[in-house]
Image: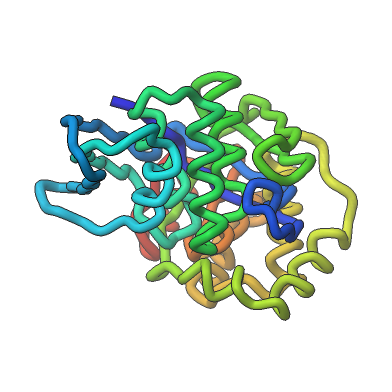
Amino acid sequence: MSFAPAHVSTLFHIHPDDDPLLHGSTGLGICLPQGTYAAVEREPAKRTSISFFEDGRKVKDPVTRRAVELALDGPEKLSFWLRRELPVGTGMGMSGATALAACLELGVGLERATRAAHQSEIEHSTGLGDVMAQAAALRDGPGTRLVQRRTPGVDGDVVTWPVDGKLALCLCGGGRNTSDVLKDDGWHEIINGAATAHPLPPPTVRAFLKAGRLFSELAGLMPPESAAALAELPMGAVGTVAHLGTAVVMTDEEVDEIATELEQFGEVRIY
């Protein structure tokens, strides 16, 4: 069984390119110890057949299917069993995590799996840098990690650090369709303007979340349900929305107490 972590993007700058392996983003994020697990059953075949199962039922996953096709050397019959620990559409980078975990399960190695998963995300407009952050977190060690993507694409420079405090994640809102934003050139200009509005912060969780909150406000990417949850944070607490979704992530010295207050908006998890 293979695993890839969820990734909360707090700030991102879009770098378009005709080559999907070079197209991507730079920015800041946080990889979580939860994500997607994938197991596969393989059989020889004359034609490739790929099926996905989750919670005992067959599911469609075009992003992961395309990534697996890119990672394969030849035709096989493949049945993948998926376990996603966080919901799709809330800003956790779960499409990238699922594609990466499935490709890793094929035994092709981290570099090749990363290339396949990233290319599929670009082709489907479901993510820009999640896979690069997730691969870096797998490379650098377990646990919750701060991630900075310094250059875009599959050969980009990505650095990570252990998170220096506790986080609370509130799975509020009904999620949003990432591709609606990533396919819109108008959004690209707004996002890139907001991403360059201030210098990058030092690698601390509070600084990453402060930068994310400013970015989301400047770019107009704060959904109403996310804003309502963040409005409940007490003085001194720092939080932001997970891009491009509706979940919020926050930190403070009294994380456990604040988490109880956030439960009115959705399920809360502490890391």
Quadrant location, the N terminus? top left
- Name the residue located 61 percent from the left edge and 54 percent from the top edge: 128
- Name the residue located 49 percent from the left edge and 52 percent from the top edge: 120
Q: Position of residue 213 (x, y in %)?
A: 69, 60
- Name the residue located 11 percent from the left edge and 52 percent from the top edge: 57
Query: Which coloring applies here?
Result: rainbow
Q: Nearer the viewer, residue 96 or 207?
A: 96
User: Is residue 30 among what the camera can see?
Assistant: yes
* Res 158 quadrant in image: top right
- Name the residue located 40 percent from the left edge and 57 percent from the top edge: 171
Above or below residue 29? Residue 165 is above
Q: Residue furthest left?
A: 56
Q: Position of residue 155 (x, y in %)?
A: 70, 35
Q: Is residue 208 left or right of residue 246?
A: right
Q: Residue furthest front?
A: 46
Q: Nearer the viewer, residue 264 or 8?
A: 8
Q: Position of residue 246 (x, y in %)?
A: 49, 65
* Res 173 quadrant in image: bottom left
Above or below residue 149? Residue 160 is above
* Res 208 quadrant in image: top right
User: Is residue 242 among what the camera can see?
Assistant: no
Above or below residue 20? Residue 153 is above
